[in-house]
Image (tube, rainbow, N blue to C red):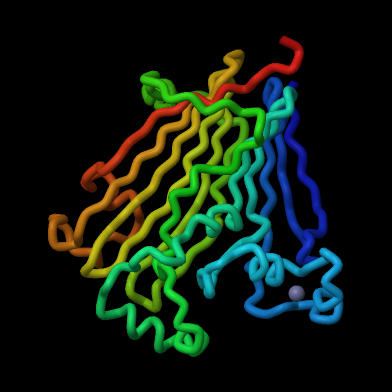
Amino acid sequence: MLRATEEMGIDSGRHPTNSQSIVFGPWHISYSISRILPSICSTKVVCEKDDNNFCQFCVYCKELSIPHFPDMVFPMNILTLKHNAGAELSFNPLDALKRVAVTAEAIEVACAEEWQEARPDAAKKKKPFDWTFTTDYKGTLSNNIEVIPTDEQINFEILKLKDEILFYHDLTLFEDELHDHGVSKLSVKIRVMPSYWYVLLRYFLRVDEVLVRSHETRLFHQLNTDYVLREYTHKEDLAKDINMPTSQMKEPEDVLPILTVKTKSMEKLKISNPSS
Ligand SMILES: [Zn+2]
């Protein structure tokens, strides 16, 4: 019933990947890890053929409307949870970056201009986009998952209980240091315990002296139930309204507990069973 495996493979960017997986009841949970997205096409001759055999960099250029990517993108850092019934939840940087605004007004700060100047390409293209890479990505769901608003809450008391951790990983999907003016980071953590699995997807933004923002998605599934609870929380405050200098916020945990909750939503992701 429970099996953890490790595999080596080659990703479509033609780089070695490393992956681990575990079988948990009807779930097959796995993650892969990869190196950073290159900043140029690595196989021009192959990609120019345009026959759908692109390197990761070219895939990103084709799929995304933003003119620039974060400094560090890990294209194959992907967490996948597959249910026997066919439902699949996954967390990947490409889908997350698809939700970065290309028209919305970016945060107007002094460093925006400096940031643009530091990236010659940016100045050239002058295409508006949210240079903080803010995304409201909550994960990628397969079509057969029904999303229903609910009042049911995640029982955080269960999460605090000390028990054996069967599987754990923390993956960075992308990260950018905003030209030394802060941090924009998307990461996902998975924890599998004997009676449940729990995922925390977190987008964290700190623009020094300007603002702090987080979009956190928590997913909780208790074994032998046919649904996953999904909680989405947006927190944000201007730096001047937080009783802590941004320089002291080394880790998101340093500031998240004191940020103002702007929105919160609860949903039930219903895993339909094909046999019923
Ligand atoms: Zn290419």
Residue 77 in which image quadrant: bottom right
Classify 71 as above or below 89.
Answer: below
Task: Work out which residue is located at the far top of the displayed protein and give it.
Answer: 276
Judged from the image, the quadrant occupied by ligand 1 is bottom right
Q: Position of residue 127 (x, y in %)?
A: 46, 77
Classify 9 as above or below 179.
Answer: above
Left or right of residue 19: residue 48: right
From the image, which quarter does the N terminus lie in? top right
From the image, which quarter does the C terminus lie in? top right
Residue 233 in which image quadrant: top left
Does residue 164 appear anywhere in the picture?
Answer: no
Left or right of residue 105: residue 147: right
Does residue 163 appear anywhere in the picture?
Answer: yes
Task: Work out which residue is located at the far front of the displayed protein and give it.
Answer: 103
Residue found 50% across the figure and 28% down from its top: 220
Q: Out of 142 and 212, give the one closest to the viewer.
A: 142
Q: Out of 90 and 121, give the one closest to the viewer.
A: 121
Q: Position of residue 190 (x, y in %)?
A: 55, 39
